Amino acid sequence: MELVFLEALENHDLRMWQERSIDTGSAPFRSKVDFAFTPYRTSFKLPYVVLSEAKKEDFDKGWGQCLMALRTTQLLNEKEGYRFELYGIVSSGRIWEFGKYTIDNRFYKTGTYSLEQLDTLLGILNRIFGECGKYATSTP
C-alpha cells in the first residue's frame, strides 16, 4: 500500500504519515490510523485523507475504524475553523475501497478495486489527493 501511495503522491504537495493517533480529548472520538495525509508540513495536523487498513480483508471492521477516524478528524478540523470533505480508504493491499465523508456527515463509498487495476487505483488516488491539495491552499 505504501508504494501505491508514494507513487500517487508524486505530483501533490501532501505528506504521508504512518501510525498516527487522532484524538479529540473525549471518548469515543479517539482513533489510530495506519496512514494519514496532510498538507506538506513538519508537524502532524489536519488529516485530509485517512486510511484504516483492513485486517484479514475484514472491510466491515476497516470501514468502522475509518469512519470513526473521519468523524474524529472532522471534529478536530472544525475546532480550528476548517470545514471540508474528508476521504477514507480501506485496503488489504490487494483490494481497495474508497469513501467520502461530507461536511453534513454523509458518507459515500465506492465499489471494490483490485491491485491488478493499478492505473485505476492511481487515478482515484490522484483525484483524491488533488481535492485535498485544493483544501490545503484554502485553509485559514
Image (cartoon, rainbow, N blue to C red):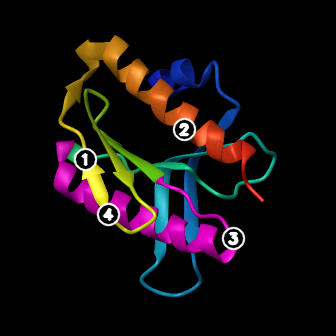
Residue bearing the label numbered 2: 131
Q: Which of marks 2 and 1 precedes in the sequence?
A: 1
Contact between labelled residues 2 and 3, with CB atoms less than 8 Å apart? no
Q: Which quadrant would residue 123 be assigned to in this image?
A: top left
- Label 3: state its secondary structure: loop
Q: Which of marks 2 and 4 precedes in the sequence?
A: 4
Up the image or down, 98 lies above or below 30; here it is: above
Hey, what amino acid is under mark 2?
A: Glu
Q: Which of marks 3 and 4 precedes in the sequence?
A: 3
Q: Is residue 98 left or right of residue 49?
A: left
- Label 2: state its secondary structure: helix
Residue bearing the label numbered 3: 81
Q: Residues within 10 Å of mark 2 (few under 14, many from 20)?
A: some
Residue bearing the label numbered 4: 106
Residue 109 numbered mark, or none:
1
Q: Tell me the distance, in whole angstroms, between the alpha carbons under discs 4 and 2.
A: 17 Å
Q: Is residue 72 left or right of residue 96?
A: right
Q: Tell me the distance, in whole angstroms, between the alpha carbons under discs 1 and 2.
A: 16 Å
Region of the chain picked out in magenta, as a range: 57-85
Magenta stretch: dominant secondary structure: helix
- Label 1: state its secondary structure: strand
Q: Residue at x 18, y 49 (%)?
A: 58
Q: Tell me the distance, in whole angstroms, between the alpha carbons under discs 1 and 3.
A: 26 Å
Q: Residues within 10 Å of mark 1 (few under 14, many from 20)?
A: some
- Label 4: state its secondary structure: loop
